[in-house]
Amino acid sequence: MGARARRTEDAALLRGAGQFTDDFAPEGMVHAAVLRSSMAQARITVGELSAIREMPGVRLVMTSADLEGIFGLPCKGKIRQVDGTHPKLPPHPLLFGDTVRHVGDPIAFVVADTVERARAAAERIEVDHDSLPTVVDMRPALEDSAPLVWPDLGSNVAFTCARGAKGATDAMMVGGGLDWLMPRGDERHCRRPESRVRNSSFDMPATPERVWTAIQNGP
């Protein structure tokens, strides 16, 4: 404790011997590509897919129409708001159907023999976008006239929360003659991407499942 941790991965990386998830290719592995929205908010119509499904090496083409009855990705955050309630959460479908809400929303999922064939097939899918009003700055997004990302929620405010002792803080501010208002944005915060890559293979019952995955922390 208190000592600098010695790095153990540098030698392999400097020799070009580092191994990443993409370096593992079990026999028979297929690859996927995702077609994503190019608009922040729009109604969409996906074109005919029969020709895409017949492209060489293509194994599977899926849109939201193929996922009826399958739940999306839940948000497990349990933030308690100032009034004691939990915020309403928007849906997070695996693939978006009638309307996309953000640039990059997934529209179609393609599986093929190679990553090049998967990407080529995804790029061939035609999607008509009917653009909807958008807002790209947080302050205008809070105005009453702002277009809503999720109209069913009635607001662009994700949640309202507070931490600490409000009464004691207010008393300190008043007693010291202070009146603070500190808007805080997130424009200058740079995060590294987390690819969350996972590669698995199995041949039951002869061989149990083997998993290669990128993780944040070492074993």
Image (cartoon, rainbow, N blue to C red):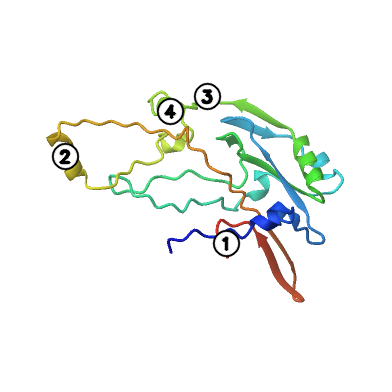
Give how far across and how far down residue 195 sits, in percent: 62, 49
Q: Is disc 4 placed on a helix, strand or loop?
A: helix
The amino acid type found where label 2 is placed reads Met
Q: Is residue 192 above or below residue 12?
A: above
Give how far across and how far down residue 208 sits, in percent: 71, 73
Q: What residue is at 56 percent from the left and 52 percent from the top? A: 71
Give how far across and how far down residue 183 sits, in percent: 35, 31
Closer to the camera: disc 1 or disc 2?
1
Task: Determine the residue located farthest toward the front in the rendered image.
Answer: 3
Q: What residue is at 73 percent from the left and 54 percent from the top? A: 15
Residue 18 figure quarter: bottom right
Q: Earlier in the sequence, mark 1 or mark 2?
A: 2
**Quadrant location of the N terminus?**
bottom left
Task: Determine the residue located farthest toward the left in the rendered image.
Answer: 175
Gap in Å between the C-alphas at discs 2 and 4?
A: 32 Å
Closer to the camera: disc 1 or disc 4?
1
Closer to the camera: disc 2 or disc 4?
2
Reading the image, the residue beneath label 2 is: 172
Residue 50 figure quarter: top right
Reading the image, the residue beneath label 4 is: 141
Gap in Å between the C-alphas at discs 1 and 2?
A: 45 Å
Q: Earlier in the sequence, mark 3 or mark 2?
A: 3
Q: Is disc 2 placed on a helix, strand or loop?
A: helix
Gap in Å between the C-alphas at discs 3 and 2?
A: 44 Å
Nearer to us in this view, 144 or 27: 27
Reading the image, the residue beneath label 3 is: 133
Residue 218: image tag = 1
